[in-house]
Amino acid sequence: MTTLTDALHALANHCQQTDSSAALTFHRGVEREALRVDRSQGRISHNPHPKALGAALTHTSITTDYSESLMEFITKVHPSVEGVIDELTSIHHVVNHELAKQNECLWPASMPCYLENNDDVPIAYFGESNTGKLKRVYREGLSNRYGRIMQCIAGMHYNFSFDASFWQFLAAHKGKTALTDAQKQAFQSDSYFALIRNFRRNSWMLSLLFGASPAIDESFLEKKPDSLSELAKRTWVGHKATSLRMSDLGYQNKAQANLFVCYNEVDTYIRTIKTALKTPYPRYQEIGVKVEGQYRQLNSNLLQIENEYYSDIRPKRVTQPGEHPSTALQDRGVEYIEVRIMDIDPASSIGMKASTLYFIDVFLLYCMLSDDALLDSDECHQLRVAQQEIASHGRELDAKFDFGHGPVRLQDKASDLLTKLKEVAQFLVAQTGNQAYLEAIIEQENKLADNALLPSAQLLARCQEAQGFQNAMLSLATEQQKAWLAAPLSGDIVDTFATLAATSISEQQQIEANDDVDFDTFLAAYQAS
C-alpha cells in the first residue's frame, strides 16, 4: 500500500518528466443558490423570475432551483479559482442591479428568511413546454412529500474534475498500463468512487470549518426541538452547531433514511438508484400521482428522479437531452464530482471566498491520493452519525466523536487531518508556485486555534448583536447590495448578459414550439426510459 507521501512524490516525478504541471490543473465550477427577498422586511419574493434575466429553463448562468424565488447562479468550468470567482462576481453584479429595480435583494444565508407557511413559497415556473412542466411537477412532488419550506435551504455546489494528464499519472502509478478506452473509463470511474469514499470519511471537516448555519428563523420548524435554544425573538440556535442545514433539522427525508447507497462499485451505485426509482412507497402512493386532472408528483416511488436522492457528494456526467443521469454514468463513466455539503458563506457577497475553493481543491486531491479502501455498512452508518453530530454541535472541539473506529477528541482528529492536508498544499505550492493553496490551510489552522473565527460562531455573534437571525441577515443583505450598486456595471457585462437573456428566451420558445406530444405521453416515455 502506497502512502500519501509516496503518491505525492510519484506525482512530482510525473510533472518533472512531462515538464508540465498539467496534471495539477483542476477543472472546477460552482453553483450558488440564494433566495430573492424584499429589501424592506426580508420576506420571500412573490414576483416572477425577472424577465430581464432571461428564461430560467434555458439560461446557462442564471436560473431558479426549487422556488421561483430561489435563484441559482452557475459558472462555466474554469482551470483557475480566480476564473470561477470572477465569473460569479459578474453574475452577482448584474443580478443585484436588476433586483434593486424591484426593491429586492439576495438573502445571504443558507437557512431561509421568515416564511409564513408552506404556501408562502412559490414553486418555480419553467414555461409551458413538456420539459418545463416536468420540472414543475417534480417540484409539486417535493412539496407534497417534504413541504416547501425545507426546499428553500440554499447551498454552494462545487463541481470538480482532474485533467487528462492526471489520469495518465494515476493509471501508471497504480500499474494500469496499456488500457483500452473501456478500461480507461472504468478506471476513472472507480478512482472517482474511491475519492467519494474518502470524502465521506472526512466531509465532517468541511462542516466544522465552513458550516455557517447554526441559527434559524422559528418559522422553519413547527416547534422548537430540544437541541435548539432561543437566542432572540423568533430565532432558534444550536450554540455549538456548525451547520443545521446539514443536520437532521435541515434536509430531512425519513423515506430515504434506509436507502443504503453504496459507493464501492459504480454498477452497485447505479443499480441502487435505479431500484429506488422503481420502488413504490406507501405514503407517496397515498398522495396520488394525477388526481382530478392535476399532477401531484411524477410517480409514487421512493424517488421521482435521481436528483431527489440527497447526498453531500455526487458522481456526475454531463447528460444528453432527455438522458437520465444514471444512464450517462453507466454508458460513459464518471466525468466529475459534485460537492454539495458547503453552506453559503454569509460574509461573502458572492456566497464564498477564493480561499475556500482552494481548500476544497487540496481536500479533494487528498481524498483521491489516499487509501482507496471500501466502505462497509457499519462504517457508512457511523460516518453519517458523526457528520450529523458535528453539524449539530461540532464547535465542542474537546468532545469525542466516533468516526467508525472508536471515540476520538475532535480537536485532535481535525488537527491530524489538517496536517495531512498541509502536506498536500505544500506539494501544490512547490509544483505550481501558487501560495494560495498553503494560505488556505493556514486560514483553517487559525480557526481551530480560535474557534471564534469559525463562520458558525461569527454568524451567531452577528445574530446576537442584531437581536435575531432575520434582522441580522436582512441587514447584511442590504449592506451587500449597497456595495454592488455603488459599483457601476461595465457596458461589456451588460451586453453579455443581455445577449444571454435574449438567447435563453428564444431557446425556451423554440422548445415549446417543438413539442409534438401531450404531457401525459411525454411523461410516460420519460418514465419508461
Image: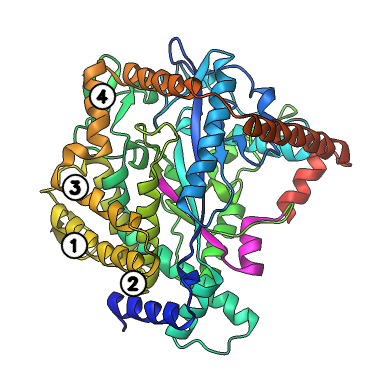
Say which amino acid is labelled 1.
Asp
- Which residue is the site of mark 2? 370
**CA gap, disc 4 and disc 3:** 20 Å
**CA gap, disc 2 and disc 4:** 38 Å
Which sits earlier in the primary sequence, circle 1 or circle 3?
1
Residue at the image point whose x is 33% and y is 41% from the top: 247
Say which amino acid is labelled 4.
Arg
For disc 1, the neighbor class at 10 Å (few under 14, some 14 to 19, many from 20) is few
For disc 4, the neighbor class at 10 Å (few under 14, some 14 to 19, many from 20) is some
**CA gap, disc 3 and disc 2:** 25 Å
Which sits earlier in the primary sequence, circle 1 or circle 2?
2
For disc 3, the neighbor class at 10 Å (few under 14, some 14 to 19, many from 20) is few
For disc 2, the neighbor class at 10 Å (few under 14, some 14 to 19, many from 20) is some
Closer to the camera, 194 or 385? 194
- Which residue is the site of mark 4? 462
Which sits earlier in the primary sequence, circle 4 or circle 1?
1
Q: In the rendered image of this protein, does residue 219 appear above or below residue 313? A: above
